[in-house]
Image: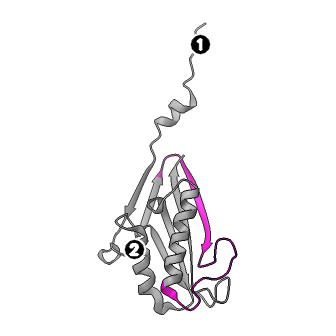
């Protein structure tokens, strides 16, 4: 009786390819966000809770009243948390930005673009809400990132 040799799990996984594709269907979206991002293959998903200008250790809101400083601070925190989980901004597939004043939309877009550099932008939703987690918060960002498993 012949027995079949099973391939090790690692060999089976090597054949599965992790691919990420960004799509823009309208010209106006190309420099602003990806309208769709698809991921195929084995991946680790990283869900980041809303990140704002809370100090990492104390929770104190940094830069009260300064949208630009809060936005930059939040993006620096995003990068740190992604790094701690084996990811970078290039691995973000979805971002939601929450603000309490829609007039900050252009500034938020500017600092988001800077945070991603030349990387493709993720799918993105921008929301104006009546308030965030803490009274002095002006912006909060949450992301989903995916890296090869």
Residue 43 painted magenta: yes
Disc marking residue 3: 1
Determine the residue located farthest toward the left in the rendered image. 27
Q: Disc 2 vs disc 1: Cβ atoms closer than 8 Å?
A: no
The percent coordinates of residue 105 (x first, y second) are 45, 86
Q: Is residue 130 above or below residue 124?
A: below
Label whose residue precedes the other's in the sequence (2 or 1):
1
Residue 90 in picture, x, y percent from top left: 44, 60
Q: Which dot marks residue 113?
A: 2
* Neighbours of disc 1 within 10 Å: few (<14), some (14-19), many (20+): few
Position of 24 compared to 66: left or right? Answer: left
The answer to whether 114 appears left or right of 65 in the picture is left
Relative to residue 22, is residue 96 drawn left or right?
Answer: right
Residue lying farthest front?
Answer: 57
Q: Residue at x 57, y 31 (%)?
A: 9
Residue at the (51%, 70%) spot, across then down: 76
Which stretch appears magenta?
40-68
Q: Secondary structure at mark 1?
A: loop
Q: Secondary structure at mark 2?
A: helix
Q: Residue at x 64, y 84 (%)?
A: 132
**Relative vertical location of residue 98 with respect to residue 1 in this rendering, above or below:** below
Report the quarter where the N terminus lies: top right
Q: Using the image as rendered, state which of residue 89 and residue 55 is in the foreground.
A: 55
Q: Is 118 one of the magenta-colored residues?
A: no
The x and y percentages for residue 51 are: 60, 73
């Amino acid at each position: 009786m012949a027995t079949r040799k099973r391939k090790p799990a690692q060999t089976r996984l090597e054949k599965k390819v992790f691919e990420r594709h960004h799509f823009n269907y309208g010209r106006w979206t190309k420099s602003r966000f990806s309208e769709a991002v698809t991921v195929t293959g084995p991946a680790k998903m990283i869900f980041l809770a809303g990140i704002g200008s809370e100090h990492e250790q104390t929770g104190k809101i940094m830069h009260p009243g300064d949208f630009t400083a809060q936005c930059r601070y939040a993006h620096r925190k995003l990068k740190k948390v992604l790094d701690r989980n084996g990811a970078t901004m290039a691995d973000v597939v979805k971002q939601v930005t929450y603000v309490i004043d829609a007039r900050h939309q252009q500034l938020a877009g500017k600092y988001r673009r800077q945070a991603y550099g030349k990387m493709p932008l993720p799918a993105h939703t921008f929301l104006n809400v009546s308030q965030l987690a803490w009274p002095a918060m002006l912006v909060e960002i949450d992301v989903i990132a995916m890296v090869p498993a």
